[in-house]
Image: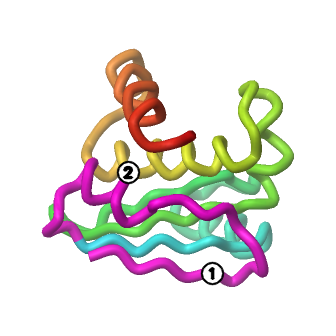
């Protein structure tokens, strides 16, 4: 089950539930939250001891549940650096967070998975 909530007015629409099921399976309990910069930075400080404002944070709670927080404002500023539209980049960040929840670490394998999933789900 995927629940989506937001503390910000706007965020890009995607088939988030379908993507989550495709990556994590139908039994995974995912919470996706779109947050502002203050909340994103607060979470990063509290749980990761980092002071910068992150674009995405993912927190596995156990083997079958987790949380992803995306900061659309940061994504909007960063998208052009990756030659993506804002909408595409938010989709990429979601996929990136899902793969972390699935146990992937940064590296070539994760990047290949991201590219494949982007081709499948993000237009």
Residue 98: give its label.
2
Residue 2 is a magenta residue: yes
Q: State the extent of the magenta-drawn residues as a range.
A: 1-28
Relative image position of residue 31 (x, y in whole percent): 40, 75
Residue at point 68% right, 67% down?
40
Of callouts 2 and 1, the N-terminal one: 1
Disc 1 designates what residue? 6
Front-lying residue, 5 or 106? 5
Q: Secondary structure at mark 2?
A: helix
Front-lying residue, 96 or 43? 96
Residue 102 vs 35, above or below: the answer is above
In this view of the protein, can residue 44 be seen by the observer? no
Q: Relative to 48, is 114 on the left or the right?
A: left
> What whole-number distance in Å separates the C-alpha atoms at marks 2 and 1?
18 Å
Residue 3 vs 63, above or below: the answer is below
Give the quarter of the figure containing the C terminus: top right
Q: Secondary structure at mark 1?
A: strand
Relative image position of residue 3 (x, y in whole percent): 40, 80
Relative image position of residue 50 (x, y in whole percent): 65, 53
């Amino acid at each position: 089950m995927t629940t989506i909530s937001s503390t910000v007015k706007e965020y890009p629409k995607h088939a988030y539930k379908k993507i989550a099921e495709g990556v994590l399976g139908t039994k995974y309990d995912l919470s996706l939250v779109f947050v502002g910069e203050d909340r994103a930075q607060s979470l990063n400080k509290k749980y990761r001891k980092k002071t910068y404002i992150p674009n995405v944070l993912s927190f596995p709670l156990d083997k079958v549940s987790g949380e992803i927080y995306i900061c659309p404002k940061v994504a909007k500023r960063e998208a052009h650096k990756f030659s993506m539209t804002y909408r595409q980049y938010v989709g990429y960040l979601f996929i990136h967070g899902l793969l972390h929840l699935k146990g992937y670490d940064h590296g070539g394998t994760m990047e290949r998975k991201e590219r494949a999933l982007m081709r499948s789900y993000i237009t």
